[in-house]
Image: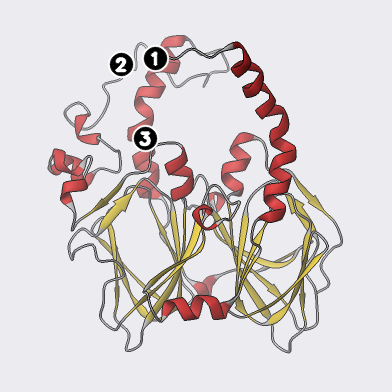
Amino acid sequence: MVMARKEDHLRMRMEHIRFGKEELERRRKSPVHVKAEEIAAQLKEHFHVYIVDPRLGFNQRSFRFWINRRSVGEEMEYSGLKLGHRHTVEAVIYILQGKGYSVIDGIKYPWEAGDMICVPVFAWHRHRNESNEDLLYLAATTGPFSMATGIAIYEEEKYPEYWIFAQKGEEAMKTLIPGGAELPPGGRVDLDQSRWKPAGKDGSEPTSAEIYYEQLAFAQEEERRRRAGKVIVKGKELRFGSTPMGRVAYAVEPRLGYHVKLLSTLIAEIPPERRSGAHRHIYEETNYILAGEGYSIIEDQRYEWKKGDTLVIPVFAWHQHFNTGKETARFLVHTNRPGMASTGYVHTQQGEPADF
């Protein structure tokens, strides 16, 4: 049994009081700009390069960002040729170069450069390069969040000795629910509709039994929602709209039918010699420059960028982007806005509007 001493209670309380001020300092020290040359040099020596990850000193806690390179005809991951792998982690993949397909829970999805793949949580998946050139793709995955909360499970087809749930049999191999094979026969919780109803549906306060039965039913309904979610974003079909931040096209977004709870992805454009809006928000953001050149002002610091660079925006830092080139600048933007919205901390402040 571990008991805190009297002095421990004060120390732990002061940690909470000091956290906010110390967090501001951690944000100031966190890297903001990763240059394309640094990533290209590492890609020559290794096929998988982490760009943004808390283990590299970044103060980004919920998702990481990385790039992969695969040769002609090669699988994206060394995970076998039937199932691939799966994880209790959200993943959004952007195809930079190449053409091929993904097999996600047995369904084949063709893709090409400019497309995105939204992989359902804990769905078996593998991806194959069918082009005559090397495949390059970017990925944002919520591994840091899942690891911090103790629910990160990665099952690789090639490493069954590390399986957690797939080893339990054929039913567990097919379900998106970790340990789903342990559900009652038929894969559904037997809910007696004469005794309960979905909590509060008739406007009344739900009973304890109703709340608990709804809890029992959640996993099977969540699996249905995951399987009904969209998987592919076709780059050619993105719809741009005007906002105070400029022209943006939301890609992977819960309100567009993608079953994500933490990640959100969009593409932003800035015309030549124009600027984006200025704003700040209480959520993490990573920007990859798909095209163009210019600079950004992030908390009064200037950062020059070009195609292939990455910008990591500190939480609640004012930021604005300026296109100084002759072509339209394009940003691939990943955030954890949906996750922060669910906690009530998605606060956004808009400053100077975009000039477009």
Above or below, comparing residue 349 to residue 352 in the picture? above
Give me the residue at 30% from left, 38% from top.
177
Q: Please name whichever residue, 147 or 258, is drawn nearer the observer in this view of the structure.
A: 147
Name the amino acid type tagged 1: Trp
- Residue occupied by mark 3: 221
Name the amino acid type tagged 3: Glu
For marks 2 and 3, give the CA distance: 16 Å
Disc 2 vs disc 3: which is toward the camera?
Answer: 3
Element type at mark 1: loop
Q: Which mark is residue 196?
A: 1
For marks 1 and 3, give the CA distance: 16 Å
Q: Please name whichever residue, 317 or 226, is drawn nearer the observer in this view of the structure.
A: 317
Q: Is any atom of residue 102 visible in this view?
A: yes
Name the amino acid type tagged 2: Asp
- Residue occupied by mark 2: 192
Q: Residue furthest left?
A: 169
Pointer 2 or 3: first along the chain:
2
